[in-house]
Image (spheres, rainbow, N blue to C red):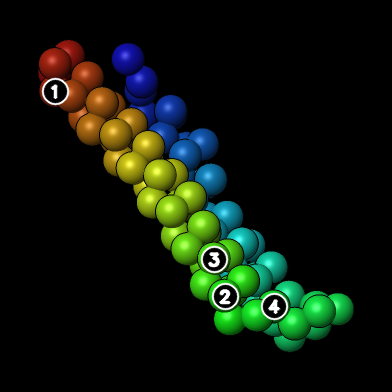
Amino acid sequence: MPDIFDLETPMMDCWSVCEALETTIKQIIEGESNPTPDELVVALMGIKQLYHWKFEHLFSTFEEVLTERNTNA
């Protein structure tokens, strides 16, 4: 069972959403080729889905930690 320290990695991993969005913004502003609206939508939908999964994983780990802590309390 995970413990409280197992939350650190998925929590920090979720912060990388800012980096993914920054990369998207740079491509729009500074990229050699301007992404089409369709390309932007696909990229943003991919980022959204990826972080949906990451946050689900984080919350699942959080629930497991709480269950373990309540069982051992």
Amino acid found under the numbered disc labelled 3: Val
The disc placed on residue 35 is 4
Q: Distance between the residues labelled 1 and 4?
A: 50 Å
Q: Which residue lies furthest to the right in this view?
A: 32
Which residue was labeled with disc 3? 42
Quadrant placement of the N terminus: top left
Report if residue 19 is visible in the image: yes
Q: How far apart are marks 4 and 2 (CA)?
A: 8 Å
Amino acid found under the numbered disc labelled 1: Asn
Report if residue 26 is visible in the image: no
Percent position (x, y) of residue 64?
26, 26
Residue positioned 52% across, 59% down in the render: 47
The mark nearer the N terminus, 1 or 4, is 4
- Above-or-below relation of 2 to 32: above
Percent position (x, y) of residue 73?
13, 18
The disc placed on residue 70 is 1
Amino acid found under the numbered disc labelled 2: Asp
Which residue was labeled with disc 2? 38
* Corner quadrant of residue 61: top left
* Corner quadrant of residue 21: bottom right
